[in-house]
Image: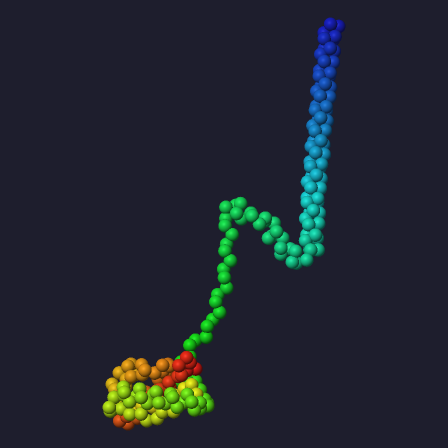
Amino acid sequence: MSSRLQTVLALTNTAAIAGVLFALVSHQQSSEQELEDLRAQVRKSAASTDANQAERRAAAETAMRLWAMQAAQPSSSRAQAPAAAKAPGAAEADGAEAPDEVPPPPPMRPPPPSFEQSRARVMTAFSEEPVDSDWSGRATQTLNETLRQHLPSSSHVKALDCRSTLCRVELVHRSAADSAPFLMEGLRAWPGSIFVASEVQEGTDYVVTLIAAKEGTRPPL
């Protein structure tokens, strides 16, 4: 082999070795760059995680402080807080009218007394009433005249008793048909009110009991 060929081969081997070394160096530099980039990403991720944790920690501490402040307030203050949050004219500003106050329902009235209750009251009041001789005499005379003028011929007065404001009258009719017209027309001359206490058939007699009240008074129904 000539010296020139040996020189060419030597140069070729040297270039090949230099290329390999260059490739190795380039690969090593690329690997180191990639490793450095990876380390930077890890540091950035760690910093982001720390920042998120710090934000969450700060939000949690703020919520705890707000809860502690609300817990320290009286219950009445917390109950009034929602109402105070809205200004008095906020409803009108929003276009909504404030609801009118609903008045309380009227008190319940007791039911009216039954006829039996009214009858018992009137008859008890008459039996307990003292006698006013002045008024009793005049009322008896007025009732006798009225009954004599309007009572049917088949009817008669069974009893007549006047006290101080009330008179008890018992009339005997042949039937209810004789009683009805008399009650409608026969007592118009009496100036006070009339209460029909009872209408009872007793054998062949139809007995009607009336309570006549003094003018300006009413039976205690």
Q: Position of residue 98 (x, y in %)?
A: 51, 52
Q: Residue at x 39, y 81 (%)?
A: 215
| Quadrant of the image occupied by residue 17 | top right
Give whichever of 215, 204 is nearer the camera. 215
Q: Quadrant of the N terminus?
A: top right
Q: Position of residue 96 (x, y in %)?
A: 50, 48
Q: Position of residue 112 (x, y in %)?
A: 42, 77
| Colour theme | rainbow
Relative placement, left or right, of 202 versus 87 is left
Relative placement, left or right, of 111 versus 31 is left
Q: Position of residue 187 (x, y in %)?
A: 31, 83
User: In the rendered image of this protein, does residue 154 appear above or below residue 31?
Assistant: below
User: In the rendered image of this protein, does residue 84 appear above or below residue 21?
Assistant: below
User: In the rendered image of this protein, does residue 75 appear above or below residue 169?
Assistant: above
Relative placement, left or right, of 193 versus 8 is left
User: In the rendered image of this protein, does residue 105 appear above or below residue 129?
Assistant: above
Q: Residue at x 31, y 88 (%)?
A: 145
| Residue 115 visible in the shown view | no
Q: Residue at x 72, y 34 (%)?
A: 43
**Number of numbered discs overlaid on the protein picture:** 0
Give whichever of 135, 26 is nearer the camera. 135
Give whichever of 72, 81 is nearer the camera. 81
| Residue 88 visible in the shown view | yes
Q: Quadrant of the C terminus?
A: bottom left
Q: Residue at x 59, y 53 (%)?
A: 83
